[in-house]
Image: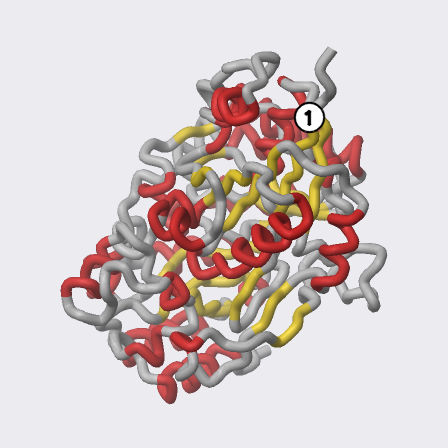
């Protein structure tokens, strides 16, 4: 009888000017782990380079009551292409020697699976693959996630992985592993809907006080700066009952109290999706707290929606307004109309929310974006009593804004993804200057009036 195979899953470090655990978990990788646990007899091993709760860290990191907190970091040499950005560059996550310690206590894997989100975080993959090769030799390495989906050629040429996987992993992972491992015991099963996929293998995480949940994937809106339509062409929504069952299971199994919704379009088709979902959560009467880091469509927030948020205990509300500049909304952001924000805030306030606790995302850094329009948007949100939050533009390959930057000579088509970093735009000439950017941050950071 053949021996069981060992599969190593790795969530790599972040290399960036700044990084923060904003309810950040490797959800896609944990879905893949759940599929392997259910449909194979492989032994799974997991290293999370972004684990803020590793018992061998030198110091215990402070964590906010809602689960957010700072990563351990180490300043590293800045890549030459970023030399003109006057900020420190760091590797965020567990120390290097702790990663090596983890490798030393693992059996030699038959396969390594790595994920990556931001295109400009790829140096973390390079280091992981380098260390894997030194320790285990030519073990097959598969790279998946947002970065290789958007930039497969760069990922193939730069990261050392043997296979670069594009698109949602659950649809093809089992046939791929069957082929790569030559293991006929691995089924060729493919999942047709999100509800067919096993719930994420959160048991692999060290801390489960806060966990993400995905109720849908895709977005029908085509904002000029957003990658959502490139990552998933169609809107897919799970059955509300399945989502609630997952949330209840994680509360009962893992004692999870904080839930972060990872949806891009949580409120779309709300009568058959989020409304019955929230009503069932309320009926269960569990001591849970909900957060919406990806932002909510303000147009969909009416009195019923606001009341359900309040009753279900949604505490961290982030609204995707993006701008209050009519020109920006007409050109780049079809999901928002004039007056939507004002109406949403009225409904939320009537439901019992304090406006000071409501966060409103405003994009900054779009090519050609007028500084006065950004400033007026910030002031308008503040005048409404809500909290403005700057959402920094990143040029994502395949989007309209990316195409504009390439056609107008701000970026070359095969530019190093490090130039996609959301903090480079003030220094690359297509938007606000560094001085103006600093003034915008100061305006946002001013305390709200009592």
Residue 412: x and y in percent read 23, 65
Residue 375: x and y in percent read 35, 78
**Protein image colouring:** secondary structure
- Observer-nearest of 272 and 305: 272
Q: Decide if residue 16 is on the left or right side of residue 373.
A: right
Residue at the far left: name it. Answer: 407
Residue neighbourhood size for the residue with mark 1, other residues' Cα within 10 Å, grouped as few (<14), some (14–19), many (≥20)? some
Q: Quadrant of the C terminus?
A: bottom right
Does any portion of residue 363 appear in the rendered image? Answer: no
Name the residue carrying label 1.
Answer: 5
Identified at 51% across, 69% down, the residue is 387
Q: Decide if residue 299 is on the left or right side of residue 57.
A: left
Does any portion of residue 224 appear in the rendered image? Answer: yes
**How many numbered marks does the figure carry?**
1
| Image quadrant assignment for residue 220 | top left
Q: Is residue 450 above or below residue 122?
A: below
- Observer-nearest of 350 and 259: 259
- Observer-nearest of 67 and 141: 141
- Observer-nearest of 434 and 190: 190
Identified at 48% across, 30% down, the residue is 273
Identified at 51% across, 61% down, the residue is 123
Residue at the far bottom: name it. Answer: 435
Residue 221: x and y in percent read 29, 44
Residue 252: x and y in percent read 79, 31
Residue at the far top: name it. Answer: 1
Identified at 33% across, 56% down, the residue is 396
């Amino acid at each position: 009888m053949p021996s069981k195979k060992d599969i190593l899953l790795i969530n790599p470090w972040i290399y960036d000017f700044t990084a923060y655990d904003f309810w950040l978990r490797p959800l896609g990788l944990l879905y893949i782990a759940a599929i392997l646990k259910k449909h194979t007899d492989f032994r799974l091993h997991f290293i999370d380079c972004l684990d803020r709760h590793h018992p061998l860290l030198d110091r215990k990191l402070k964590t906010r009551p809602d689960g957010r907190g700072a990563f351990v970091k180490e300043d590293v040499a800045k890549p030459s292409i970023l030399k003109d950005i006057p900020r420190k560059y760091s590797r965020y996550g567990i120390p290097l020697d702790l990663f090596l310690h983890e490798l030393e206590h693992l059996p030699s894997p038959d396969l390594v699976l790595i994920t990556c989100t931001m295109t400009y975080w790829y140096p973390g993959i390079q280091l992981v693959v380098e260390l894997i090769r030194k320790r285990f030799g030519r073990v097959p390495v598969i790279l998946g996630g947002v970065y290789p989906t958007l930039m497969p050629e760069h990922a193939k040429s730069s990261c050392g992985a043997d296979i670069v996987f594009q698109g949602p992993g659950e649809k093809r992972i089992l046939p791929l592993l069957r082929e790569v491992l030559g293991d006929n015991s691995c089924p060729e099963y493919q999942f047709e809907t999100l509800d067919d996929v096993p719930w994420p293998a959160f048991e692999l995480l060290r801390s489960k006080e806060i966990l993400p949940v995905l109720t849908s994937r895709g977005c029908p809106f085509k904002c000029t700066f957003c990658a959502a339509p490139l990552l998933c062409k169609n809107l897919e929504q799970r059955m509300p009952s399945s989502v609630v069952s997952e949330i209840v299971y994680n509360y009962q199994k893992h004692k999870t109290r904080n839930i972060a919704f990872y949806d891009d379009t949580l409120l779309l088709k709300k009568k058959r999706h989020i409304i019955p979902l929230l009503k069932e959560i309320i009926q269960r009467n569990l001591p849970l707290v909900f957060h919406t880091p990806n932002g909510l469509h303000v147009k969909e927030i009416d009195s019923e929606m606001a009341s359900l948020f309040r009753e279900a205990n949604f505490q961290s509300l982030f609204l995707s307004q993006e701008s209050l500049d009519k020109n920006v909304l007409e050109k780049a952001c079809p999901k928002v109309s004039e007056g939507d924000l004002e109406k949403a805030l009225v409904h939320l306030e009537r439901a019992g929310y304090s406006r000071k606790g409501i966060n409103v995302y405003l994009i900054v850094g779009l090519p050609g974006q007028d500084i006065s329009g950004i400033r007026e948007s910030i002031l308008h949100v503040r005048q409404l009593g809500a909290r403005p939050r700057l959402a920094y533009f990143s040029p994502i390959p395949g989007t309209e804004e990316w195409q504009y930057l390439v056609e107008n000579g701000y970026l070359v088509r095969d530019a190093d993804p490090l130039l996609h970093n959301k903090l480079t735009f003030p220094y690359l000439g297509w938007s606000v200057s560094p001085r103006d950017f600093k003034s915008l941050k100061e305006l946002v950071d001013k305390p709200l009036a009592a």
